[in-house]
Image (cartoon, rainbow, N blue to C red):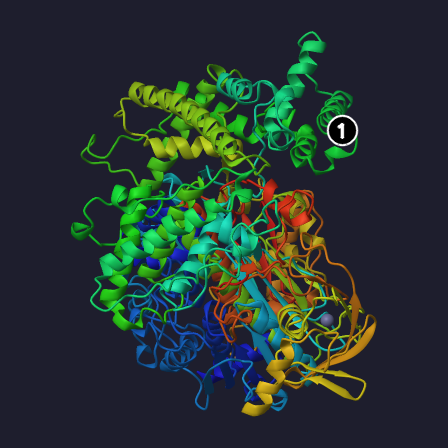
Amino acid sequence: MEAQKKQRYDRQLRMWGEHGQEALERCKLCLLNGSATGTEALKNLVLPGIGSFTVIDGALVTARDLGNNFFLEEADLGRPRAECVTRLLKELNEHVRGSYVHEDVGSLIRTNPAFLDDFSLVIATQLTEPSLRLLASACRERSLPLVVLRSYGLVGTVRVAPIEHVLVEAHSDNTPSDLRVVDPFPELLAFARDRFGHVDTLSSSERKHVPYVVLLLHAVAEYKAAHGGALPSSYKEKQAIKAALGALAERWFGEGGAADALNVEEAKAAVNTALSAPSIPPSARAVMAEAEARLSAQKPTLPPEPGQSPTFVPDPSTIRARNFWILAAALARFVRAEGKGTLPLLGVLPDMTADTSSYVELANIYRAKAAADAARVHAHAVAIAHDAGLPDDAVPVEQTVRLCKNAHSLQWLRFRSLDEELTPASARAAQLGALLDEGGDAPAAALYVLLRAADAFHARYNRWPGTMDDDIESDVPLLKQCVGQLLSEYRQGGATLTIRDDLVFEMCRYGAAELHTVAAIVGGVASQEVLKLVTGQYVPLNNTYIYNGLNGTGVVAEL
Amino acid sequence: MSATRAEHAKAVAGSDVASAKVLMVGAGGIGCELIKNLVLCGFRDIEAIDLDTIDYSNLNRQFLFRAAHVNRPKVEVARETVLSFPHDAGTRIVAHHGNVKAAQFDLDYFKQFTIVLNALDNIDARRHVNRVCLAAGVPLVESGTEGYLGQVTVIKKGESECYECQPKSDNKKTYPICTVRNHPDKPVHCIAWAKELLFKKVFGGEETDLVDNSEAAPAADGAPEQPAAAAPPAPKLELQPGESARHFAARVFEAVFAADVRRLLAMSSLWKERAPPAPLELAALVPALDALPVDSPDEDQAAWSVAESAAVFVGALVRAFELRGVRVGQLAFDKDDVECLDFVTAASNLRSAVFGIPAQSRFKVKEIAGNIIPAIATTNAVIAGYIAIEALKVLRAGGSTAQCASAFLCRALSGKRKDRMIVSTRLNPPAAHCFVCGSASVTVQLDLRTATGALLVQEVLIKKLAFHQPNLTKGDRGLYESGDLDEDEVAIEEAKLGKLLTEPPFSLRTGAMLNVSDQSQSLDCELIVVHAEIDVEAHPLGFIVHGADSIGVRRDAGGAGSAGPSGANAGDDSDIEMLDSAPVPASDSTPTARKQARSRRSPSARAPRTASN
Ligand SMILES: [Zn+2]
C-alpha cells in the first residue's frame, strides 16, 4: 500500500488490517436512491476508501432534500439528485471512483435487473415494498449482498440481507487458551526436559523463573505416572494438581518462602483452563461439516479463477467465500488426520514470569508448531484446490495462516430472505411478539408493523400517509385499516400484537419525512454493517435493526 | 428550506431549536458529524472550541476536511465547510481555535449557553468541561468513541451522574524509570526509552542522562561501584560544526548502543539475576556508512532486522537534518511524522537487540508510542446522531435531563445483549462519594518524611485530581497559589514546590485538613493529608488517594476533538509515562528490586491508551 494511503487510513487499518482495506478497495458499491439516509450511509463508506460507488436515482432535487441532505447545494435545486450527491460525495476521497445513473430505481429493477451484475454490494433506500422485493430477489439470484435502510420520521430500520456470510476474523475479545499441557507436542516436551529437566537442582532464583507452562507439564506428568496414565480432568483432580504445585513450591522455597514465587501462582491460576483438553466450538464444527458437504456435493461454490473462463470474472468477495470453504474443508481434514481431533495450535504464549531467553525460546516453540500445523492445513487446501481444477496458489498462504489463527471463531451466517420475512406464511410473528416489550410506550414491534402498514398504504393509495397537504387526520383511519390487516396476518402466525392509536397518528404525522439526525444514525449503523460484510471481519447483525427515535433505543431481531 | 428545518426541529424536539445557544467542545471525529447535525437540525447559534490542527490521518473520518486543509485549525475549517453548504439564513457559527482551559472560557462564558456538547478526545479536557458545566449549571452531553464502540450520556448538576462520579479504568501505563533506563525487559520499555528519553535528547534538546546511576550498588566496603557524584556528565548529543549528519548519527549510535551499554554492564549487581546486555557495533551492521541509502523503508508490518534498524536509525537522522536543519533540537515527537516514527522504531528495536527483547514492526511501534485508538466514520456518525437527539431532548424538557438516557454502542452481538446493538439506560443519579459534583472530601496518604510541595501540587492535585490552577489553604493561611500571578509571584510559588510538606510554608502534620480551590473550574474541596509509608511497588506514584482513587485513571472512550491538552504534558502523544521511583538498594529484599527481578513478560505489550479521535 502506498505511504499516503497508509497515513490516511492508519486509524482504520488498526481495525481491519491491510487485507481488510484491500477488500474494501475492491468493492463496487451501488446506492439506490441518494436521499439523506442514503448519502449519510455512503459518506461513511467513501471516507474509509470503498473501491467505487454508483448512485442510481431518478429523483430531482427538492427543497425538502436541501433541508435534510448535507450533500447538496442551493444551486442543485431541480437537478438530478444522483448527479448532485455524487459530485459532492466524490470530494470526500480522491481514491474513490464515483459515478451516477439518473434513472428511476423502481422501473430499472422491473425492466433491467441485469444492471446489478456490475456491483459487489447494493445499498437501497426509499423503495416501495414491491420494488424492494423485486430487488431482493434479483440480488439473491446473483448472490449479491443487499443492505436496506430506511428512515421515516423518528423511526429507522436497517435490514442486512445477503444469502449467507462467512467470516474468519470475528475479533472477539476472548482468545482461547491453547497451551497443550494435556497432550504436549514433542518439541514442547523436549524443551521442558532439556531446559528444566532437573528442576530440583536449580538455584532458588532459577526456580522462580521456570515458566509456568513447564511447571504444569511437570505436574501433569507426575500425576499421570501416579495414576496409570490417566489425565486429571475433574474438578477434584485439578485441585490435586494445584496441591501438587503448592507442595513443589514449599519444597523449593521452604514454608512461606513461596509467597513471591509468581510462576507457581501463575501455574495454579492456569490449572482450570490449561488442563482442559482443547475443544472445537460448535460453530466451527458446523463450518467444517458444511465445507465438506459442499465439497462432496460439488456445489457451485467454487467459481473459476479469473482467466479460466473468458466470460466470467468472479467478484473478490466470491473468491473470499470460495477460499473460506476450501480452507474450512482443509481444516476438517487436518482435524481428522494430523490434529487427532484438535484444531491447529494457536501458537500464542501469554505473559508469564520467566527469564527472557527461556520465554523467547518457548514462544518460538509454540510459534513454530503453529506454523507447522498451518503448513499442514495449507497442504490440504492446495490438494482440494487442485482436485477442483484450481491453480495450486488459488489460496494464498497468508489466508491459511489467518484462518488457523481464528479457527475457533469461524462463522457461517445465513440470512432469511425478504420474501420469507414479508410473506405471511413464513413471517416470524413470534420474534416480533418478543419485541413488544422493547421500547416502552413505542415498542419496536409496533414501529416495525407501522412501517409495513405505511408500505401497504402506499401500495393502495400510491402516496405515503400524512402527505396530503395539511390533512393528516383523514389518513389516520386509512392507515389503521392497513395496520389491522397486518395484525390479523400476524395473529394467524401466532402472535397477538396491539398498536396504540397515538402511534398510528404519529406515523401519519411523519409524512415519510427523513429527518437528518435519524438519517445520520441509521446511515451510520447501515454503513457499519456494510464494512463488516465487505471486510469479512467482525460479526454483522442478523438481520434487522430497528431504531426508535421516540426514546433513543435500538434493537436487533432476526425477522 | 428553513421551513423544512423547522419541521425537523419540531418533529424531533417540539422546541425552539433556533433560539438555543449551543457550545460544541472539540471539532474532530465526533465534532465534524455533530456540527453538521446541529446545522441540519436547525440550530442557528453555535460556538465551537478546538485546539487541534488537521492531520492527514484525520481524513478517513473527519469529513469536513480535505487534503488541502492539512495543518489548518480544525475548528475554523469545520466552520467554513459547514457554512459553504446550504444553511438557514442567520446561522451563526463562532470558531475558537484554542484550549478550552484558557482563561477566556471562564464560568461566565459557559453560563451563556443553553447546552454544552462534548466531542473531545482526552480525559483531562473532559474533566475540566465537566467541572465548569457543573458550576455553571449548564447541561452537558458527554460522548466518546473507540473503533466500533461509542457512548453518549447527559450530565447535569444535581440531576445525573457527572463525568467523575464513576471510576473508569485506564490503560495508561507507567513504567519505573530505572527499568526503562537500565534494564528493560519488554518492547514497550524500549519504545518508552526511544520516545521519551533518546528522542527528546537528540531531537528535543533535553539534557538527560540515559543511564540511571542510582542503581549502581554499593560494593562490599560500602563505597559505591560507580559513585553517582563522580559519574561523568551525560554527553550532549548535538551536531557539531562541520560534522555530517551521517557521522553524527554514528556518534549517537556509539554513545547509546555501545558506550552507555558498557556503563550499564559495569553495574554488575544489575546482572546477577538478569541476562546482561550486549553492546552493538555500527560498523558491523552498516559496513558502508557513507554510501548508505537514507530512504524510509516500505516495510511496515514486519519487524526490521537489527542491521535494517541500524540503517533506518542513521537514515532517519540524516533525513531529519535535511528536512528540518537547525530545528532538529526543538522537535516534539509526532507519531504521524515519518522521521520521528522511523527514528523511534529503529532506536527501540536496536535497544531491544541489546537486551535480547523481540523487535516490533513500525506499525506496532506507532500504535504504542502514538497511543493510537482505532477510529472510523460510522461510529462517530451514530454517536453524533445520538448527541443531537439527547440535546434536543434536553431543550424539549426546558433544560432538564429527565427524558435523557445514556447510550452505548456495542460491538459484540452475542450473549445477553445479542438483540441490542445500542444499549440505552437511564441516567444514574449523582454519586454521593464524588468530590466533584458532591461535597465529599479527598484523603491523600503520602510519606511526610520525603513528600514535597511538588508531589502534592503537581502529582496529586494537578495530575491525579485534574485541578487546573489549584489554590491551597489551611484555615485562613494560604499555602500555595496558582492562576493569575505576576512573574515575581510565580517565582515565589515555584520555590515552594521544592520544600518538604513538613517545612514552612506548608508545615503539615498527619491529619492536616486543607482546602483546595480552583477558580477556573469553580471547584473547591476538602483535602486531608495523612502520613503513611508507601509501598512504591503497589503505588509507584508515591501516594494513595481515597475518595477519588479511581478518578485519575479512567479508561477513556476516545472522542473526537482536542480542545485541551491531555495530561500536564500537552498533546495526546504523552501516554507512556515514566516514574522516578525512589532509589532502592539492589538487594532481593525490597519490593522494588523484587519487581524488577521478576517480570520478563510477553513481547506483545498492549498499546496504552487514553485518547483518540
Ligand atoms: Zn460527580
Secondary structure of residue under mark 1 = loop
On the image, the x and y values in percent for residue A447 come to 62, 59
Image side of residue B130 versus residue B381, left or right: right
Point out the residue furthest to the front here: B221
* Front-lying residue, A403 or A258: A258
Instruction: Kindly identify which chain the residue marked by label 1 belongs to.
Output: A
Q: Residue at x 47, y 59 (%)?
A: B378
- How many tags in the picture? 1
Q: Amino acid type of disc 1?
A: Gly
* Front-lying residue, A373 or A179: A179
Q: Say if B545 sits above or below B603 in the image.
A: below
For residue A216, what is the image quadrant? top right
Q: Say if A356 sits above or below B230 in the image.
A: above
Point out the residue furthest to the left here: B291
Image side of residue A417 versus residue B394, left or right: left
Q: Which residue is mark 1?
A: A254
Image side of residue B205 versus residue B92, left or right: left
| Ligand 1 positioned in quadrant | bottom right
For residue A81, what is the image quadrant? bottom left
Q: Is residue B61 visible?
A: yes
Q: Say if A471 sits above or below A360 in the image.
A: below
* Front-lying residue, B103 or B319: B319
